[in-house]
Image (cartoon, rainbow, N blue to C red):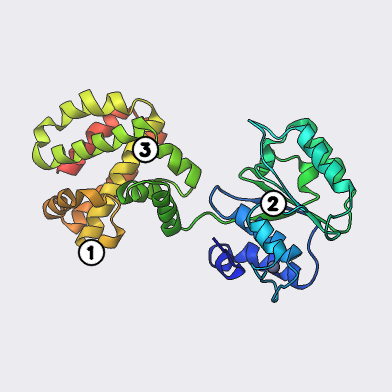
Amino acid sequence: MEVHWSDMLQTQPIVSKMVMNSINKGRISHAYLFHGDKGTGKFTLAQLLAMSIFCQERTGVEPCYQCRDCRRIQSGNHPDLHVIYPDGASIKKEQILHLQKEFTYTGLESNKKVYIIDQADKMTDNASNRLLKFLEEPSQQTTAILLTENSQAILPTIRSRCQMLSFTPLQSKRLEEKLQEEGLSLANARLLTAMTNNLSAALEKSKDTWFAQSRKIVVQLIEMLQQNPNEVPIFVHTQWMPHFKERVQLQEGLDLLLLWFRDIVHYHLDESSELVFVQHREKLETGSMQWSLAQVTDHLQEIMHAKRKLEQNVHPQLVMEQLTLQIQR
Ligand SMILES: [Zn+2]
């Protein structure tokens, strides 16, 4: 897939503008550190920068995508572009040594050389120290691009030699699309997007059976609040509390409950495109008939209040008992 600078400007305007500017002015740094969440386009931008560096037929900053250099970069076999990935769990000293050795020969076709180190935080200490030596003797024509989700795990001495560019988290619409591209249903993608703005965290959660069970229990509690309020105390005691054992778990259960009542607000306001629990429209409709907009707004505040009480070490069971009573009022 061809990604152009104009595409990158849409998703990462700040870093794209900075890099485009340095290409335009012929002031490309010797070393960059791209940091940001998974899925924010670090590798894509690194590859695009490499194309802009090597392409002979560039129009402004935009590479031509047709010439030999462009095509070989896109297919991953350009002789003067090296990409290093973790070998197993880490990036090892030998990989950096190998790179350095390759780079002692002048460029095969030009003097320019570019290397990308993906997941640079996975470098062992030895590899980091080796790279540091390499960065300390920059040749005019070499560009290093380090990519990481965790810039704090990179040696400060390496960081200080790089131009740091921070990739902004995905917009929620984009995250939702990405999750669907990864095979998640719309309903799952939307819920996980509401819970986190990070692709890795969302994917991890999507595989978490505890979380899947949490959703079921939240929906069950709602059903019971709507249909059999008398049974709510027993349900809280026998189902809810045993599942949300730890305080952090209960906080997450309450976050789900918040999203549910927020959905009822959206339902009242006719904002159905905003719904998170898209697969439960009927229950949300029932909820909107049972609770007026004013009541739902109260319930949202009561849930927020319950979350604060949990932080203040009020007994979890007591917090839940009070909350469910308030919601039934
Ligand atoms: Zn080209």
Quadrant in which the C terminus appears = top left
Which of labels 2 and 1 is toward the front?
2
Q: How far across and how far down the image is residue 230, in percent?
A: 9, 33
Quick check: which quadrant has ligand 1?
bottom right
Q: Residue at point 69% right, 66% down?
A: 18
For residue 269, the mark is 1
Quadrant in which the N terminus appears = bottom right
Which of labels 3 and 2 is toward the front?
2
* Relative horizontal placement of residue 144, taking residue 190 as reference (left or right): right
Q: Amino acid at mark 1?
A: Leu
* Relative horizontal placement of residue 258, taking residue 203 as reference (left or right): left
Q: Residue furthest front?
A: 68
Q: Is residue 124 above or below residue 24?
A: above
Query: How far apart are the two marked residues, 3 and 1, measured between alpha carbons?
Result: 26 Å
- Secondary structure under tag 2 reads loop
Q: How far across and how far down the image is residue 43, in percent?
A: 62, 52
For residue 77, the mark is 2
For residue 252, the mark is 3
Q: Name the foreground residue: 234 vs 168.
A: 168
Q: Amino acid at mark 3?
A: Glu
Q: Amino acid at mark 2?
A: Asn
Q: Which badge, 3 or 1, comes first in the chain's sequence?
A: 3
Q: How far across and how far down the image is residue 197, in percent?
A: 46, 50
Query: How far apart are the two marked residues, 3 and 2, measured between alpha carbons?
Result: 46 Å
Q: Residue at point 77% right, 42% down?
A: 156
Q: Name the foreground residue: 134 vs 95.
A: 95
- Residue 301 visible in image: no
Q: Which badge, 2 or 1, comes first in the chain's sequence?
A: 2
Q: Which badge, 3 or 2, comes first in the chain's sequence?
A: 2
For residue 51, the mark is none
